[in-house]
Amino acid sequence: MDGMPVYRINVLIENKPYISDPEGDTIRKDLVVKGGYHNVKSIRVAKMLKVEVEANSAEDAKDTVRRMCEDLRLYNPVLSVCKIVESGL
Amino acid sequence: MHIAYHVSLIGIVVFPGSNCDRDIYHVLKNIMHVDVEFIWHKREDLNCYYDAIVIPGGFAYADRLRAGIIAAFSPVMQAVKRLARDGVPVIGICNGFQILVESGLLPGAFMRNDSLTFTCRWTMLRLNVNGSRTPFTLLLKKGTRLNIPVANQEGKYYVDDDTLKEMEKNEQIVFKYEDNPNGSLYDIAGVCNAEGNVLGMMPHPERACEMILAPSSSTNLSTNTGYGDGILIFRSLIEYLQGKQKVSI
């Protein structure tokens, strides 16, 4: 251990906006709207990975996670977009 | 005159979670009478032992993260990529198709079926290219209909517009569904790479080789011979491999 701090980084993987999301549509149409929440206009399902990384700074941690996502195709760029955000220590 | 063929050896890649590997072994060994071997996913070097590779269906690595993605990074797939680059015929069926897509050997991506459910039923495919386009369709005429079942949850093929146009121009859209079971773009059931030696298909030909498994709706040329339509995929491959041997003799 070199005593580097650990950063918590969230990776949010979701389909591109123009790609249909039947799961989100079903949740909205058959559960949420039928349950009375008529003002809910859209639900999109996403996948989140909570990652802990040792790094010198939050920027370094996010950079590592970004490279990891690209190199190992943690998201499929044909279908999805990937957002990388720090969730705080 | 007797022509002696070199015996072809076909490799079936096995991942933790593959579950159609033995069905394919049965078809190749007991119906087609060719030499066939299982290849465990940790193998890094396949050298030139194999004349063709089959990536079977199942749930490699339990489909974690995304169907096919973890398998795509396995040691054996790096070796399969090298063989594919050398022109060795490679077929990925169902999960095998997903693995080929995630490996970058085939274009596109897979999504959850429109129904959101696992869909297991017989479908009717149509060959959308000339049979000579791939080693696995060699014996078929363009437009041939094949009755072969699908069994998938992430079987909805997707590709962006520009790539689709290019694939159409290059005759890479090999099979189309007549009765799209999962919402696949452009009714796509199977595609090949630009070179034609790598084919991915969602339906399972190995489950449609014997009449005991095939439904009465299989009214194709093959039904008269006591086999289901799926056998034509494997017969085509063997024909292709034997043709290559003849040339090399």
Image: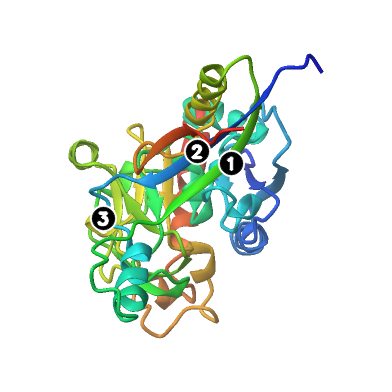
Disc number for residue B185 = 3
Side (left or right) of A70 relative to B18: left
Q: Amino acid at mark 2?
A: Val
x and y, in percent, of residue A51 in the image: 61, 36
What color scheme is it?
Answer: rainbow
Q: Mark 2 — residue?
A: A11
Task: Assess whether mark 1 and mark 2 are in contact (beta carbons under 8 angstroms).
Answer: yes
Residue A30 visible, this angle: yes
Residue A29, placed above or below residue B197: below
Which residue corresponds to the image point at 66% horizontal and 63% vertical from the top-left? Answer: B30
Disc number for residue A63 = none
| Mark 2 residue element | strand
x and y, in percent, of residue B211 in the image: 51, 79
Residue A57, placed above or below residue B33: above
Q: What is the CA distance from the residue labelled 3 to the residue labelled 1?
A: 32 Å
Pointer 2 chain: A
Side (left or right) of A77 relative to B161: right
For marks 2 and 1, the one nearer the N-term is 2
Q: Residues within 10 Å of mark 3 (few under 14, many from 20)?
A: some
Q: Nearer the viewer, residue A49 or A9?
A: A9
| Mark 3 residue element | helix
Q: Mark 1 — residue?
A: A50
Q: What is the CA distance from the residue labelled 2 to the residue labelled 1?
A: 6 Å
Q: Residues within 10 Å of mark 1 (few under 14, many from 20)?
A: few
